[in-house]
Image (cartoon, helix red, strand yellow):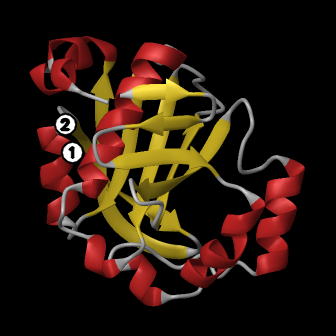
Amino acid sequence: MTLFGDRIFSLRLQLRRVEERDLEQLASWSNQGLAYGDYLTPERLSLEQLAHQLRSGILWNGQSKTFVIELKDGAAIGTLHYWLRAEARETAVMAVKIAVAGERAKGYGTEAQRIMVTFLFNRLGVRAIEMYTDINNTAQQRCLKKLGFELIDSLGYLDHQVERTGHLYRLDQDHFAEELSYHYVHG
C-alpha cells in the first residue's frame, strides 16, 4: 500500500477522492440495479444531488470519505466509503461496492478492503472497523473472514429505506496486528 495525498495505491488498484469528473458515472451507478447487485439497494441519487454532496463536503471530510476504486489503467469500477461512528469515533464503518458487474469475483473488492483496513488502522489510528453485509451475501462474508473480521451479530438494518437482514462483522486493532495477511500488503 502506498499513500500519496488523497490517493492510495495497491498492486492492481487505486483508491482516490471523488472528483467533479466522476459525478456522471456515480449518478449512473446510483440509478442502476445492476451496479448494486442483489445485496445493496440503489441510492437513486441525481447528478445535482451528487454535485451538492461534493461541493458541501459530504463525500470528503474529517469524519467520512468516499473513494472511487480504479484499476491501474484508470477505469473506475466502484466505490469504497468509510465513516467514523458518531457515538464512537474510534470505530470506522466501511462499505464497498464493485459497481461494474464484469469486475466482480476478481478479488478487487477484497484488495480494496484490505488496503483501506490497513490505512484505517495504521494511518488513522482507529481501534475497530465494522462492516454490515446482507445475510445472503456469502461471497462478502467469506471475504470478511479472510480479512480477519469476526461475526458480531445478526440483525435487521435499513439500507436506503429498504429493510434487510444481515450480519455485522468487526475487526479490532489487536486482531488486525495478529492477522498475517496484512503484514504482506504490497503497493
Residue 30 percent across, percent down from the top left:
59, 78
Q: Position of residue 105 (x, y in %)?
A: 18, 67
Q: Nearer the viewer, residue 89 or 179?
A: 179
Mark 1, Cα crowd under 10 Å, few <14 / some 14-19 / many 20+, is many
Three-letter code for the amino acid on which mark 2 is drawn: Leu
Rendered view: 185 above or below 13: above
The quadrant of the image that shows the N terminus is: top left
Residue 36 in the image: state x and y as whole percent: 42, 77
Q: Report the side of 23 relative to 76 (left or right).
A: right
Residue topped by disc 2: 147
Q: Residue furthest front?
A: 73
- Position of residue 83 measured from the top left corner of the image (x, y, whole percent): 58, 39
Question: Residue 144's mark?
Answer: 1
At x 77%, y 50%, the residue is 58
Above or below 10: residue 38: below
113 relative position to 82: left or right: left
Amino acid type assigned to the residue bearing label 1 in the image: Leu
Residue 104 makes an appearance in the image: yes
Residue depicted at 66% across the width and 54% down the height:
18
Q: Residue at x 53, y 79 (%)?
A: 42
In the rendered structure, are the residues bearing label 2 and label 1 in contact, judged by CB atoms less than 8 Å apart? yes
